[in-house]
Amino acid sequence: MAYRAAMGTHLTTFQGSIPDALKRAIEEKIEGSTAEVTGGGGHFNLVVTSPVFAGKSMLESQRLVYSAIAHLMAGDQAPVHAIDSLKTRTP
């Protein structure tokens, strides 16, 4: 059975909290990171803080985040349709 998100018509077969899954994926794959996740309906906003971003360009930092969550954005019924805003910071 497909899940219909409260904020839109994005369909997915994903079970569980999508924001929690995003946070967990980022924090597990990017050393020393903390992730703030807001949004819904397949569209999310991320603020990720990690010492790993020090000395990296904004693009390099964002690529690290997208790499950590790629599995949540893959396929026709992926739970994450878009990242509307992505901010990376160093502590």
Image (spheres, rainbow, N blue to C red):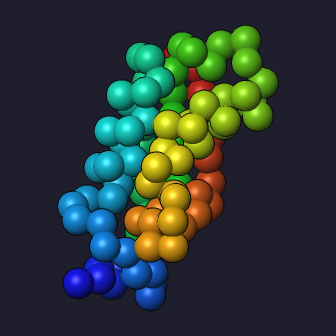
Q: Looking at the figure, which quarter contains the N terminus?
A: bottom left
Percent x, y of residue 68: 50, 37
Residue 43 visible within the image: no
Residue at (67% x, 36% y) in the render: 63
Report the side of 2 relative to 73 (left or right).
left
Quadrant of the rendered structure where residue 59 is? top right
Looking at this view, name the residue that lies furthest to the bottom: 9
Residue 81 visible within the image: yes
Residue at (59% x, 42% y) in the render: 66
Residue at (32% x, 39% y) in the render: 24
Report the side of 81 relative to 21 (left or right).
right
Looking at this view, name the residue that lies furthest to the front: 75
Report the side of 63 relative to 7 (left or right).
right
Quadrant of the rendered structure where residue 7 is? bottom left
| Between 34 and 68, the one nearer to me in the picture | 68
Percent x, y of residue 61: 66, 29
| 22 lies above or below 83 | above
| Between 45 and 4, the one nearer to me in the picture | 4
Residue at (54% x, 14% y) in the render: 51
| Between 82 and 35, the one nearer to me in the picture | 82
Q: How many marks?
A: 0
Percent x, y of residue 53: 62, 19
